[in-house]
Image (spheres, rainbow, N blue to C red):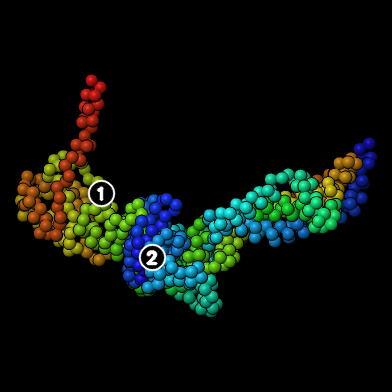
Amino acid sequence: MILATATPWSGVSSLLLPALGQTAAMVGIVMCIVVTLGLPLGLLIFNTSPRGLTPHTTVHASVSWIANLGRSLPFLVLMATVIPFTQLVVNTTIGIKAAIIPMSLAGIPFFARLVENAVREIPRTRLDVGIASGASVLQVIRTIQLTEALPGIVAGLSLNVIAMIEYSAIAGAIGAGGLGYLAVNYGYEQFDSHIMISCIVVLVLIVQIVQFGGDRIVRSLTH
Amino acid sequence: MIEVTALTKRYGSLTVLDGVDFAVQAGEIAAVVGPSGAGKSTLARCINLLEKPTSGSILVDGKDLTSLSRRELRSARRAIGTVFQSAGLLQRLTAAENVELPMRYVGISHGERVTRVRQLLERVGMLHRANHYPSQLSGGQQQRIGLARGLALKPSVLLADEPTSGLDPQTTSSILRLLAELRDELRVAVVLITHEMDVVRNVADSVARLHEGRIIERGTVAEVVRSSDSELARALLPLPPGPAPQHESEVWQLRYERPDVDPSWLTSIARELDTDISVLAGLIETIDDGGTAGRVTVRIERPLEDAEVRAAFASRGIHAKQQATGRAEQLEPQEPHRTLVRSAA
C-alpha cells in the first residue's frame, strides 16, 4: 500500500532536481548575506573585547547580546517570530524569499561567533606584531586577523553552510521549497518512500561534500 | 637611544610599574631581569606602547612617545623594533613576507622592500629559508626571522621581550651572538627583557633588576658581579652547591673584585699563608668586558687570623668573607626535633 503510492524511481529526478536547485539557491543567497554581515560583526565583537584593537565595553556587550539573541531561539520559533519583519522586508511570508530572512537572521550571528572564535585563537603576540610595527587598525585586521584566521574562518564557513542546509529544510514548513519541503510533503505526508530515500541520500551527500571540501581547503590554507 | 622616566602603570588599584627609570644608549644592550610577576612584560608592552602608561615618559631619540596622538604614535612606533617571545611570526606568511610586513604598513615601495628583505635575511643568515613558512623552521630560525622583522624599519631601539625563552642553550647563544653583532653594526639601543641570567651574563652591557614594579638594583654587568653580594650579583654568578662544610669557621666565600685576577692565586696564597686550601665549589667565567668574574668557596686547612686571610686575598683582587655561621645549624635536624620532644613533655 505504502509502496504503491511511491513515485516510480524514473520519475524521482524530475522532482528532486528542481528541489535541489531551490535548496542551493536559498543556501547560496543566505550565505552571501551571512558572510557580508557576519564577518564584520564577528570582527566587531572581537575587536571591542578587552583583547581587541579598540576595546569598548558597552559596544562589546550590546553587540554580543544581540548576537546571542539571534542564536538563542530554535530556528522554527525564530522563523515564526520574525514573520512581521519578513513581511515588511520581502512583502511575503511564504516561499524562498520569505525563508531567506529568518535563515539570514539565524546565520549571521552564528557566523559572527565562528569568526570571533577563529580570530581569538590567534596568539596574542601575533596580533601585537602589527600594532607594534605601526600598522593602522584596518591594516591589522586585513593583514593579520583575517589572514591568520582564514583557515578557522573557512572551517566555520562549511559548518555554517551545513547549518543553513538544515535550516532550509525546516523552512520547507513555510513552503520555501527545496529538498526539505520535498521530503516533508511527498515523502512524509504522502508516504512516498522513494522521494524520502532520495532526499535523504542527496542531503547526506551534500553535507559530506561540503564538509570534505571545507576540510580540504582548510588543510591547503594551513602552513 | 631610549630614556624611560618615572614610568608608572596601574590597572585600577593595582600598581604594576612604579616609577621605573632607565636609559639605554645607542650600541648598548640593557637587560631588565626579574621574576615572573615583577612587571617585565608590562614594561615591554609600555615601551612599545602596546599599553599606555599611566604616567611617566618614554623618550626615543628625544621625542616623548607618551604625549603623542594616536596618529603620531603610529609613525613614532616605527623607531622601536620589537622581537617577540617565541618570534610571533605570522604562520600563513613566508619568512620573507614576515620580514616585509612592517615595510608594507609604512608604504615602502615594492622594489625597496625586496632589496631590504634580502639584506635583512642575509644578515641573520636566513636567506636560504626565505620562502619557508614558520612551521617549517626551527625555534632558533624563527627567532632569526623575528630579529630581521624587528629591524625592518631601521629602528633606533630594539625591544627584545624574552627572545630566547624556549630555545636550547646552543641556539640561545647563537641568537645572542647575533644580537650583539647587530648592536655593534647598527648601533641600536637594545632593551633585553629576560629571566635567564645566563643571557644577561653573556650579552648584556648593563642590567637592572625589576622587583614588584620597581627597579631596585642596576649597574653594568661587570660592576654588579664584582662589587657586591647582592641578590642580583648572586643570581648572575651563582655559586654551585658544594659539599656541606664540617668546620665552617674555616670555610670562606670568595668573589673576584677585579677583572684581572691572577688565576694562580690558589697556589700563591697557600704558599704565603703556609696552609693547604681546598676548593669546595666555584664558578669562574669570562664576561662581556673580557675580564673574569668568579665566586669560589674554599676551606683553609690551618687555623689563621681572619684579617690575615682577608688581606692575602684582597691583595690579589679577591674579596673574602667567612661563610655565614648558623647555616649548618639550621640544616641540623636535632634542634627542632628536641624542641618537639620538649613541648610534648
- Does A64 sit above or below residue B50? above
Identify which residue is drawn at 6% across, 52% down: B308
Q: Residues within 10 Å of mark 2 (few under 14, many from 20)?
A: many
Residue found 37% across the figure and 61% down from its top: B7
Where residue B173 sits in the image (x, y, percent)?
Answer: 35, 61
Query: Where does the image place residue B335, in percent across and percent down from the top left?
Result: 20, 31
Mark 2 belongs to chain: B
Q: Position of residue A46 (x, y in %)?
A: 58, 56
Horizontal and vertical percent position of residue B33: 34, 56
Mark 2 and mark 1 residues within 8 Å of each other at the beta carbon: no
- Residue B240 is labelled as 1
Residue placed most toward the observer, A165 or A101: A101
Going 94% across and 40% down the picture, which residue do you hit? A4
Q: Look at label 1 and name its amino acid.
A: Pro
Q: Can residue A110 be seen in this view?
A: yes
Which element type, helix, strand or loop, lies under badge 1? Answer: loop
- What SS does tag 2 mark? strand
Give, as a three-letter code, the residue at label 2: Ser
**Is residue B79 rendered to the left or right of residue A51?**
left
Q: Mark 1 — on which chain does it sit? A: B
Q: Do labels 2 and 1 share a chain?
A: yes
Q: Nearer the viewer, residue A181 or B318?
A: A181
The residue at the point 33 percent across, 53 percent down is: B211
In the image, is A152 to the left or to the right of A213? left
Disc on res. B57: 2
Discs 2/1, front? 2
Q: Which residue is farthest top?
A: B345
Between the C-alphas of marks 2 and 1, the distance is 41 Å
Marking on residue A24: none
